[in-house]
Image: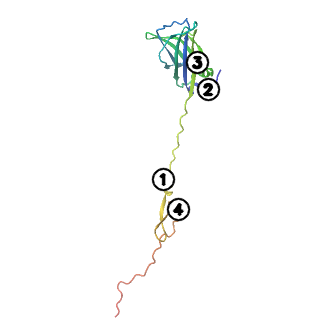
Amino acid sequence: RMTSLEPANCVTHWAQVDTVFLSPQQAVSPEGKFLVRAMWLGKEKVVQTGSQKELSPNDSVDFPWRCKVREQLKLEAAPDVRVIVLHIIQLTQGAEQVLGSVMLDALDSKNHSETVQEALYDPRGHRLESYLKVKLATATAAAPAAAVPVIQQDPVAVQRAVPVPVPDAKSGALSELKTTEEADDEEGEVLYEEDPEEEPADDDPEEEV
């Protein structure tokens, strides 16, 4: 059952691992440690490994052992993949042993809407009686922020819009502020009245005889 979820390569996924239930057929060491490792199918070099957990007895004949994981394993978006692989690993004296694995379709709505119980498969592909409770969650990758356009101001236009004092035509006193444009519009007007030219006086008047 497919959904309208974003393609797996567009989102970040979390595998919300709950509990592993182990059947009596599983060869487990009660003193050992257990962990879950998550990866994309075909991308085995990029993995997320959970912390080590302990096995505990379970009040069930069918599943006498259980391991409470209660962890979220994050898988970053990867191109051209949609299947998540979870390995259940037992650690015994430092050595790792894969007890079983689960494969989940990242685009299946059932894996996102509820906690599913998935059967484990051994490394040879045989179905085991053990199972894992798990749920997937996603977060759409954030779109890059749009670049804010830089507004370039025309320095000439800015200069022409700055008010400048204009002297009064008669008194010569500074009157109201006007922009350079307004001052240019009044170009040609006589701002100062020139004194009329006077006849030059004789420095050496003729003396009367």
- Pick the quarter of the image with the C terminus: bottom left
Query: Which residue corresponds to mark 2?
Result: 5
Task: Name the spot of residue 9 as percent of width and height, x first.
Answer: 56, 26
Query: Which residue corresponds to mark 4?
Result: 182
Q: Please identify, in this view, whether the residue under mark 1 or under mark 4 is nearer the observer.
A: 4
Tag of residue 155: 1
Mark nearer the N terminus (1 vs 4): 1
Three-letter code for the amino acid on which mark 3 is drawn: Leu
Between 17 and 192, the one lying in front of the other is 17
Work out how far the residue at label 3 is from the one at label 1, CA to CA, in angstroms: 62 Å
* Picture layout, residue 134 above or below residue 171: above
The residue that appears at 64% across and 24% down in the rendered structure is: 3
Q: Looking at the image, do the residues carrying marks 2 and 4 touch, with CB atoms under 8 Å apart?
A: no
Work out how far the residue at label 1 is from the one at label 4, CA to CA, in angstroms: 18 Å
* Picture layout, residue 30 above or below residue 79: above
Work out how far the residue at label 3 is from the one at label 2, CA to CA, in angstroms: 15 Å
Q: Quadrant of residue 108?
A: top right
Three-letter code for the amino acid on which mark 2 is drawn: Leu
